[in-house]
Amino acid sequence: MKAFIILLLIACSFTAKGISLQCRYINDIQNKFLENHINFSSVNTTLQTRAIEQFVKSLDPQKIYFLKGDVQKIKRKTRKLFSDLEKRNCKALYDIYNIFKKRVEERVTFATNHLQNNFKLIKSSVYNVDVDNLPYPRTQKAARKRMKNYLQYQAANIFITEENIGKVVQHLTQTLNAKKTRVVSWKPQLTPREWGHCKRIQKEKNFKTCKPSKWFARYLDAFAQSLDSHSSYMDNDAIEEFKIHMELSLEGIGATLTSRFGYTIVERLTPGGSAFRSGNIKAKDKILSVGQKKKNMVNIFGVELQDVVSMIRGPKGTPVYLKLMRETEKGKKQFLNVRLIRDVINIQEEAASIFFIKRKNNRQFKNIAILTIPSFYGSGRFGMRSVSRDVKKLLKLPQTKKADAIVLDLSNNRGGSLDEAVTLSGFFFAKGNVVKQAEKKASRPNLLSDRDSSVLYNGPLVVLVNRLSASASEIVSGTLKNYERAVIVGGDRTFGKGSVQSVDYLPHKLGAIKTTVGLYFIPNGHSTQNDGVSSDISFPSVLNVEEFGEKSLDYALPKQIIAPFKSPPKELFSSNPEENWKPVTSGTITELKKLSLKRIEKNEKFKKIKQKLSRFQKRVKEKKPISVQEILKDDKKDKEEELTASEDFPDLHHLDEKKKKKKYLERADVEEAINIAIDLSLIHNKTKAAQSQSPHTI
């Protein structure tokens, strides 16, 4: 049986012209989800309740739009939702849209008026961030009060960076109006006159202003999320992003964009891309207009980011025109018109990479290789780029540069291809079982093994993980731990995603469905589901809380255990003595842990992390609403340190390679992983020396 990859690309045999997602397809797509899902085979009352709850939650996650009566009304109108959808009747979905659109327009109108009426920050204002346990407001008066508190909370957070209340009001107003415009564009029932108007605008501006399929897509994604936390519906925009992520390639200008307060902003440039080569575009530039022709520029303020991206991307060799606004150091605005030629862009920053660092220990210099793998990319298509091909080339360097040890950095790696994880695991031992996957339609778990007897690296190996390491990265770290091939260090454990998804393309370009088809198990027979892979040596981390992990997600699947399927040593070790590796024993881990603990206790960075973690845990435990005064009393840096992991896991994409490497090495977890790698290499050297001096029988 051919192995699935976690996100399997299944080719679609339909070549018909794409059609928009409409009501009559909803039931068939729901049934398609149920064909392969590990837990559900047919719809039932429980699933219907879940789907409605997820839909409402996705529309109003902060509970600032719907009233309690609205939610009760929605539940009444959807009592027969699944049976109605089976009859191609979407009246309930239309009714939900009308309720939602009405409330969004009401709240946005109230909020924008409130902001324009001499808005000021009120330090005593409080906002309850524990939204899950927050009831919906009962009355319009209560809803307006909550919106005021929400605006105060948002304004305080923006004020930290802007320090100008006028700009804060402007940004919030733009964001709210963009929200209203977006919701209006989702109207699922359009009259012929409305369709005609939309088509005229689309022809003039080259982007869609009417997107009824988006409303149905949101419902289908909510249905998928009601099955489990990792099933989802992907529209064509999401499919394009998925392919880019798996293949690390696209056709465009080589710029990563973000949206903020209605503006499309250049976040970073890809070296080698046409935007980078032109020298005319910089990070933080705002894109005001886009055109396929110089005389046909379209104002994109307030346009959804995905629509802007679609306008800028295009076939290799074709031109695109941009109008930019850049703020100079003196605060003046500079406007530029730029013409770029689209090209094939390889996303190097998301690819595996390796570099070497020399550190002194006990008067000895140790050369440590740091191999970073941001994701397990690889589409399975012949000739396309994959992480295993890239790493296979990179692993030649530790030998030529005589590395004493390798740190394999899987921190923040959210997974990818299961096949790639199996192949990459096998680079560090001869042959061996890696993973079993259990599916609903299979009579027994399917075993995936590394059958290549070559060992690409047999030296000391340290694997760095944290609670954002998920899926394929858990397979690699779990397998290497089970076989005592590496020391696992970093956060207390990995994310805990032990499920397998397949991606099926729907006919007629109706999107794709990502369905959880089974669980996977590492060689000791344990699924990593919920519990993840525990570190042999754990460091203090702001991520070491239950809010980061599979257990915190809605409808997470339960963990399972099967019989162990570890391969025997005779398979794991090569017949060639030069390729053999030394197992990491419990005694070695104990020794490494003692050395690491001494360093951590003295390390100022880890002391700060402990303080941040303590404050975060206290706030979560108390579930106390946060006040504007609390937000403003700390400066920007303190605020970020307390509420996010940005200081501990910084975004380095906007830096050049030299600065990026320096910043990366300043991470406390990276520093300590390198120290452990040095310790491990010294322990291995001691063992080799002892073995060489021991008596031999002849």
Image: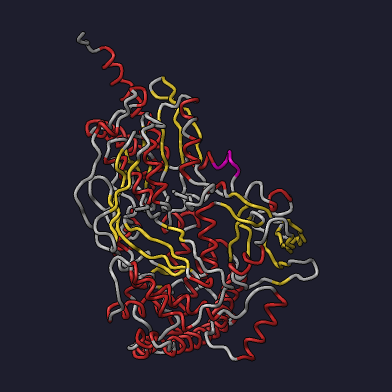
Q: Nearer the viewer, residue 427 or 633?
A: 427
The residue at 29%/71% (across/down) is 40
Q: Nearer the viewer, residue 19 or 363?
A: 19
The residue at 52%/49% (across/down) is 382
> Residue 338 in magenta?
no
Within the image, what quadrant is residue 690 found in?
A: top left
Question: Which range is magenta?
Answer: 656-660
Q: Is residue 126 visible?
A: no
Q: Which residue extends farthest top?
A: 698
Image position of 529 (left or right of 18) = left
| Number of marks in picture | 0
Residue 558 x, y percent position in the rendering:
25, 62
Image position of 225 (left or right of 571) = right
The residue at 42%/59% (across/down) is 643
Image position of 48 (left or right of 220) = left
Q: Which residue extends farthest right?
A: 295
Q: Is residue 21 visible?
A: yes
Residue 241 x, y percent position in the rendering:
53, 61
> Residue 658 in magenta?
yes
Specify the quadrant that holds the C terminus. Answer: top left
Within the image, what quadrant is residue 305 found in?
A: bottom right
Would you place residue 147 above or below residue 587 in this image? below
